[in-house]
Amino acid sequence: MPGTIADDVMIHETAVVDDGASVGSGSRIWHFCHVCADAVIGSGCSLGQNVFVGNKVCIGNNVKIQNNISVYDNVVLEDDVFCGPSMVFTNVYNPRSAITRKDEYMDTIVRRGATLGANCTIICGTTIGSHAFVAAGAVVNRDVPDFALVAGVPARQIGWMSDFGEQLDLPLTGVSECTCPHTGARYKLDGEVLTRT
């Protein structure tokens, strides 16, 4: 099925966008990028220098992908996701050069509003929750809850983040409430689940 590239998409002269790719209005594709034929990219996205987007990739609206990132097959980035410079996705859990495992690609889903810090690694098969925040250099090998702040190798939860991107004054577990000092939004912690009320 042929893709559609909106009229106002900016594609740098050094970038390659294969026939069949779909790119939404207002998106920008910068130097030395390669977007494969079956990729779907939403509106208002920015792909920094040297970004690769595979065939089986779906990118939502207003997604920011910084320099030197490969978004491999079976990765889904929902709206408003931020991918920091040189962060890494994988799509095979146990790769070997001599063994073809393309039929073993695992799905990785990054939910709306999540931030993936510079140089972090997201191991395939994980889901990063809505508005979660992965610290720079972290290695994520398990699902990350909505609004969770995770750091370290392997990544462990160390706090909670507001959808504005500020750490909230809440315990990791229990029953508690707080207000984001920047937006006034209210958050409620019930056990290990945080919701915006």
Image (tube, helix red, strand yellow):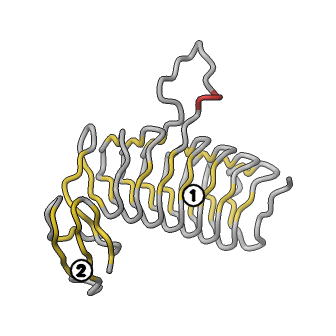
Outermost residue on the top side: it is 98
Question: Which residue is located at x 27 percent, y 57 percent?
Answer: 149
Q: Nearer the viewer, residue 90 or 64?
A: 90
Disc 1, disc 2: CB below 8 Å? no
Earlier along the polypeptide chain: callout 1 or callout 2? 1
At a point 24% along the width and 46% down the height, the residue shown is: 156
Image height of 72 relative to 168, above or below: above
User: Which disc, if any, is residue 134?
Assistant: none
Residue 121 screen position, x and y as percent: 39, 41
Position of 170 compared to 105: left or right? left
Toward the right, the furthest residue is 1
The residue lying at 38 percent from left, 65 percent from top is 131
Q: Nearer the viewer, residue 11 or 40?
A: 40
Local packing at callout 1 (Cα closer than 10 Å; few below 14, some 14-19, many 20+) is: many
What amino acid is found at the position of numbered circle 2 in the picture? Cys
Q: x%, y% of residue 187?
A: 26, 76
Picture coordinates of residue 144, whole percent (x, y)? 35, 52
Q: Which residue in the protein does label 2 denote?
A: 180
Look at 60% across and 71% down and name the residue there.
44
Query: What kind of element bears circle 1?
Result: strand
Label 1 is placed on what type of residue?
Leu
Q: In this view, does 56 lie above or below 60?
A: above
- In the image, 12 versus 24, the foreground residue is 24
Q: Residue 72, located in which quarter of the rendered image? A: top right
Position of residue 191 in the picture relative to residue 164 (left or right)? left
Residue 170: x %, y % from top left? 15, 68
Splitting the image into 4 quarters, where does residue 173 fall? bottom left
Answer with left or right where residue 4 lies relative to residue 80. right
Q: How far apart are marks 1 and 2 (CA)?
A: 30 Å
Secondary structure category for the residue under label 2? loop
Residue 47 - label = 1
